[in-house]
Image: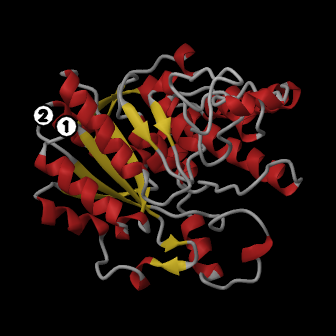
Amino acid sequence: MCAAVNFDISVWGGMSVDQSLLLEMYRRMGLVRQFDEAVQKLFNSGRIPGSAHLSIGQEGEVVGACMALREDDYMVGNHRSHGHPIGKGAGVNALMAEILGKSTGVNQGKGGSMHLADFSVGSLGESSIVGSGLPVAVGAALGSQMQGNDRVTLCFFGDGASNQGYFHEAMNMAALWKLPVVFLCENNGYGVTTPNNRAAALEDISARAAGYGTPSSIVDGQQCLEVYDAVTEAVERARRGDGPTLVEAKTYRYHHHSEGPLYDNMTYRSDEELAAWKLRDPLLLFREQLADSVAVADLDRMDEQVKQDIAAALEFAEQSPLPEPEEAYTHLYRTPVVVIEGELSNG
């Protein structure tokens, strides 16, 4: 584990960054990558009901943004968000169990791949409805403001979601009330198979922030530290009470929109484009940045530990029981209503 390795302070972009933080970033990026690789294998073997959307290739912006938060800050994901709770610090055992619909999952097996939530690390949930996390994040930020605490909410959404009404309503309300929220657009270039330049009139999603008097920035989503730097600044601004910021991370997903044979023969992107982005793999780029201060053997040991952690999570999930049938009737209401047979009538 990274906590056992001690290094001096390094500097990134004029900002001092503790090496233990850098190593934790590397560890979490590895966990996100290997978690999704394991999910892909489970899906291909027919073990996962429904769809599976992988964030392989986007680990830099996921972890860089999440690690700019405090442990008690909030985070809202989207349909491609297995890695976001991991980036926020969630353990992988209960997440893997949730993917397989087991009772030991973070949502007792009721959430599955696209509806993970882990309140223990401030992960408020994810949704398969494109853009629906934006109003949830605004609500969480409003709650923090009304309670008088300084918690910040980080909201992930894709370039496709920026064309939804949710986006504009959320931006307007957050700017009007100066809510402590950071909007992080994961611009991976495609909405399913439609390139962004065929869905939006603007090249940069961040330009839309000007319409709401909100500051914005564009970062290289493959560079974990660049994302961390930008989101740290946005989080500090939100915590001061100065309102929201829109950060656009230019990134790329190496897999299709979702797993399955539907996309096998589609040619919506070229092999050359994919190959060029794979040369900018966020894990490889970050490993190169660490090479000057961290021994390769230490990084290899961390990679092996991550591999063991994912293997242990798979074993935990496999051995966990499925929910009992009566569990379908729990967690439906905050305060359940007890109905005694015969006491209610049609009148």
Q: Is residue 217 left or right of residue 278?
A: left
Query: Looking at the picture, which amino acid does disc 2 mark?
Result: Gly
Which element type, helix, strand or loop, lies under badge 2?
A: loop
Label 1 residue SS: helix
Q: Which amino acid, mark 1?
A: Ala
Q: Quadrant of residue 91?
A: top right
**CB within 8 Å, label 1 to label 2:** yes
Say how the picture is coloured: secondary structure
Q: Is residue 105 left or right of residue 147?
A: right
The image position of residue 100, as x and y in percent, is 78, 39
Picture layout, residue 66 above or below residue 156: above
Q: Which label belongs to residue 57? A: none
Q: Position of residue 149 (x, y in %)?
A: 22, 21
Q: Circle 1: is it few (<14), some (14-19), or many (20+) Cα within 10 Å?
A: many
Residue at screen point 55% across, 22% down: 2
Is residue 298 rendered to the left or right of residue 71? Answer: right
Residue in front for this viewpoint, 20 or 187: 187
Identify the residue at image location x=35%, y=79%. 200
Q: Which residue is mark 2?
A: 241
Query: Which residue lies at the image location 50% right of the left edge and 39% below the top edge?
Result: 125
The image quadrant that residue 12 belongs to is top left
Give whichever of 300, 146 is nearer the camera: 146
* Residue of label 1: 238
Residue lying furthest front: 347
Q: Residues within 10 Å of mark 2 (few under 14, many from 20)?
A: some
**Rendering quarter of residue 314:** top right
